Image (cartoon, rainbow, N blue to C red):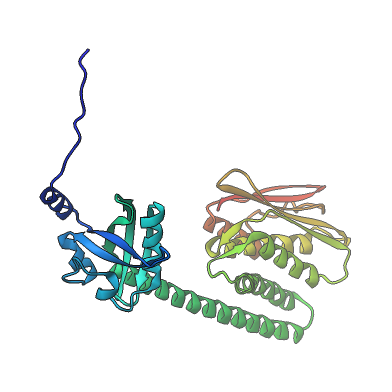
């Protein structure tokens, strides 16, 4: 068996210069300067590559100290490099320098003899500027959307109030009932924007808060009648694209149950939202009323047509099971 002997690699100063000049990043070797108590006070540039000047804007730095080159240099740099050079810590970090007008991505490591250290760095000022502009634009867009949500909510509340006034001005009958149903639909959408404003979100809402608020509003609309409404809602974030049709479906199905299922004026309606798997959710609206009229076509009625349309928006088809012990409507959709 042959034995391979590893020979130590010896590089001349010219070899080192050639090597570090190959680097795309800025590179320099420095030595830490300390006071009588051994505390770091400055550092001297000993060697650097061609990219050093381009990325720092410092010319003729070899042999000079950092404070000679940048008198207002922040203490952070001396303190950080002091720990690296004197305590043997390697560190990767990003930091800006107001005195230099630049932002750097830095990797620094200790060298022998003690007190020396190497810095490999990249000027990321432009990247940070773009990120800051993007963040500012995003913040402005969020503020505009929040204001838009607030205005939409106020507009819907105003519309709901107008419809309510028109309804009260009419005598009991089909016209007044139709206006009441329209008002509930408007309130269902207004509930979404109310939850968006309350949560500070602009594009998603908690299913439990949102749907429970809709059910509570419907319960309030029936007053003291002995019909019990229950909401069993699992919490999940719903995008506004999902939340709007889902809330309107709940509004229509519960309203239908309240209107048709309980001729004797008492019973229970249960609204359930629960996960089916990691992506799909099941909405169920169930009552213990008298069941659907077998002579009525399933697609008849504006409310049922709206449910079909909103379910299509969610990519699902409602399944209806009805009998003498009640009606259950189930919809499976992808969140």
- In the displayed image of the protein, which residue is found farthest to the front? 36
Q: Position of residue 24 (x, y in %)?
A: 20, 56
Q: Position of residue 310 (x, y in %)?
A: 57, 60
Residue pictured at 46% horizontal, 75% vertical: 139
Foreground: 9 or 252? 9
Tell me: residue 152, above or below residue 13: below
Q: Position of residue 241 (x, y in %)?
A: 53, 63
Tell me: residue 10, above or below residue 105: above
Q: Position of residue 303 (x, y in %)?
A: 65, 63
Foreground: 184 or 201? 201
Say which quarter of the image contains residue 123: bottom left
Foreground: 33 or 310? 33
Q: Is residue 120 left or right of residue 282?
A: left
Q: Is residue 125 among the parts visible in the rendering?
A: yes
Q: Is residue 301 among the parts visible in the rendering?
A: no
Tell me: residue 300, above or below residue 149: above
Say which quarter of the image contains residue 105: bottom left
Q: Across the whole image, how many numbered discs are drawn on residues?
A: 0
Q: Is residue 173 left or right of residue 145?
A: right
- In the displayed image of the protein, which residue is found farthest to the top? 1
The N terminus sits in image quarter: top left
Residue pictured at 33% horizontal, 52% vertical: 114
């Amino acid at each position: 068996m042959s034995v391979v002997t590893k020979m130590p690699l010896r590089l001349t100063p010219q070899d080192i210069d050639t090597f570090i000049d190959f680097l795309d990043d800025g590179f320099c070797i420095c030595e830490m300067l300390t006071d009588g108590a051994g505390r770091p006070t400055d550092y001297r540039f000993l060697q650097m590559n061609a990219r050093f000047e381009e990325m720092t804007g410092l010319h003729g730095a070899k042999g000079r100290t950092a404070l000679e080159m940048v008198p207002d240099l922040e203490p952070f740099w001396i303190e950080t490099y002091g720990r690296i050079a004197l305590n043997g810590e390697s560190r990767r970090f990003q930091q800006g320098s107001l005195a230099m007008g630049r932002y750097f991505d830095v990797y620094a490591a200790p060298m022998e003899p003690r007190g020396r250290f190497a810095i490999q760095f990249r000027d990321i000022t432009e990247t940070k500027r773009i990120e800051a502009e993007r963040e500012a634009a995003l913040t402005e867009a969020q503020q505009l959307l929040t204001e838009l949500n607030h205005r939409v909510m106020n507009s819907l509340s105003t519309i709901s109030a107008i419809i309510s006034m028109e309804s009260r001005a009419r005598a009991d009958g089909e016209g007044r009932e139709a206006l009441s149903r329209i008002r509930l639909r408007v309130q269902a959408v207004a509930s979404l924007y109310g939850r968006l404003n309350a949560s500070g979100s602009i594009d998603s809402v908690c299913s439990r808060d949102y749907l429970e608020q809709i059910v509570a509003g419907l319960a309030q609309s029936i007053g003291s009648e002995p019909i019990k409404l229950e909401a069993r809602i699992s919490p999940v974030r719903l995008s506004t694209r999902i939340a709007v049709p889902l809330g309107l479906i709940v509004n229509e199905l519960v309203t239908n149950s309240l209107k048709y299922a309980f001729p004797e004026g008492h019973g229970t309606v249960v609204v359930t939202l629960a996960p089916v798997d990691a992506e799909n959710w099941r909405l169920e609206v169930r009552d213990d009323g008298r069941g659907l009229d077998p002579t009525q076509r399933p697609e008849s009625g504006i409310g049922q047509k709206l449910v079909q349309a909103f379910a299509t928006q969610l990519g699902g088809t409602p399944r209806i099971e009805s009998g003498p012990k009640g009606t259950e409507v189930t919809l499976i959709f992808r969140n």
